[in-house]
Image (cartoon, grey):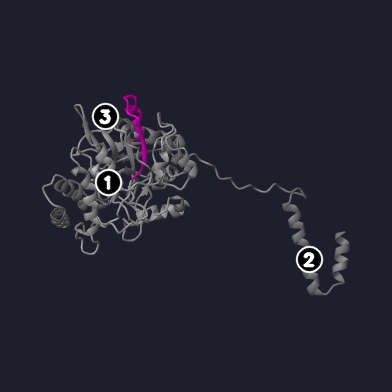
Amino acid sequence: MFYRFINFRKGLPMKKRNMLAAVCILLIVSACSNGGGQSESPVKSAEPKNEPPKPFTLNYYTNLKPAVMELETSIIQKKFPHITVNPVYYSATLKPEHLAPAGSVPDLISFTIGSLWDFRDVDLLSDLTPFIKKQNFDMNRFLPNVLESVQAYSDKAEILFMPYTLSSNVLYYNKNIFNKFGVPYPKDGMTWEETYELAKKLTRQDGTVKYKGFQFQLQNLTWKNQLMQPLVDPATFKTVVNGPGWKRWLETMGGFFFIPGNEVGGSFEKNQDVAMYSGPNILSALPEAAKNGLDWDVVSLPSFSGNSSEGTQMISPFYAMPPKGKNMEETFQVIAYMMSEEVQTIKSRQGQVPIINSDSAAKQYGKDLEGVEGKNLNAFFKDKVGKPFKTTKYDDIAKTVIYTELLPNYYKGTKDANTALREAEESANKKIEEKRK
């Protein structure tokens, strides 16, 4: 065959003969490299291994009660078995300002909203926006005005914290006292003015027992700020509590204590001598009180007559992450999971009002608590979050002056409304100036 190729090649022009020879050489080399025609299997690239997540300890700083923290720990470690939760509890010697100097900066913070500025003042809050985007966390899951309320705490509309349950208010009432004096039970949608009339009918003495018509936790309803009145001017850092809005609030809420016999005191749960009460959510404590004879129910938190505000200021405990943490990605995964419908439902069953827009979670409210069957638990969901006003780091000073100075000075009768408001304004401004130095 090769001889034929030589003879054939001789009949070609020189240029074509050279090209043909080159092609033949390539064919021979190719055949040899293929081992006589037997092909080798292509080399497979190494497949990526799904390595388990690395174990780490989640240092969790909180002011939660140990029993509540046990539930948090259980939820987290069941979902993330590689995480060990280490609770670090707030104390007089371990406040937010003590954490960094003590070398105890946590991975995760869970606190009440009133302490938010304490963490911000010592640079223990980071913007969660990058983690929200990277992990595709859907902020539309929240109830209306929740996101706006969070952003109101930042000049740059940052997400400095993640609220995880609503501290919704209701009006608790003792059926036994209403039955005793033949007074109709309260209803959803009442005004404070109507509640005042009920309180007058129920404030009376029977034998040695002095019954009080209505009591409320001063701090809680001050924070609630149902009239949505601003507290401190963000431009001047001067308090604005001496105005018509706060005057109406003072005369309405403080007016309850002018009912003869309805001075501050009594106990809705323990002594059961208070007919109506409002304050922080006490639902989980009521089954025990019921064992001691309390026959209770709830209605929605009364409103101010003619008030056009669509809701109240958001009160919510929150999650946050200090900046420059070693496990920030993993910690945000924990936060995201705690905001899931699954966890919100678990907490709803324990009596915590879901902060996400989930009918499924809402329908499970209180299911794990004893003695709530047949109660008007839907009242907890009538307390809506209103549009926020701009907050300042000095709002807490104004709020504290309102419930520790303004209200007591008024309801004790030592100051009239105008004087009490003016002195509260002066006191708050002085405290703000001292804080700013």
Q: Quadrant of the N terminus?
A: bottom right
| Residue at horizontal 87 percent and vertical 67 percent from the top | 8
Question: Which circle marks residue 221 in the picture?
Answer: 1
| Residue at horizontal 58 percent and vertical 45 percent from the top | 47
Q: Which residue is mark 3?
A: 270
Bounds of the magenta span? 282-301
Instruction: Using the numbered discs, state the Cα–Cα distance from disc 3 to disc 1 in whole angstroms.
Output: 21 Å
Nearer the camera: disc 2 or disc 1: 1
Amino acid type, label 1: Leu
Q: Residues within 10 Å of mark 2 (few under 14, many from 20)?
A: few
Asked if residue 67 is positioned above or below residue 398 in the image, the reply reads above
Q: Which residue is mark 2?
A: 21
Q: Provide the secondary structure element on which disc 2 rests.
A: helix
Amino acid type, label 3: Lys
Instruction: Using the numbered discs, state the Cα–Cα distance from disc 2 to disc 1 in whole angstroms.
Output: 99 Å
Check residue 295 for magenta coloring. yes
Q: Nearer the viewer, residue 52 or 165?
A: 165
Instruction: Using the numbered discs, state the Cα–Cα distance from disc 3 to disc 2 in whole angstroms.
Output: 108 Å
Q: Provide the secondary structure element on which disc 3 rests.
A: loop
Residue 434 in sight: yes
Q: Nearer the viewer, residue 89 or 65?
A: 65
Amino acid type, label 2: Ala
Q: Nearer the viewer, residue 157 or 210?
A: 210
Q: Quadrant of the C terminus?
A: bottom left
Q: Residues within 10 Å of mark 1 (few under 14, many from 20)?
A: some
- Horizontal arrangement in the rendering, residue 158 relative to residue 141 (left or right): left
Residue 17, image quadrant: bottom right
Check residue 164 for magenta coloring. no
Q: Residues within 10 Å of mark 3 (few under 14, many from 20)?
A: few
- Horizontal arrangement in the rendering, residue 101 relative to residue 321 (left or right): left
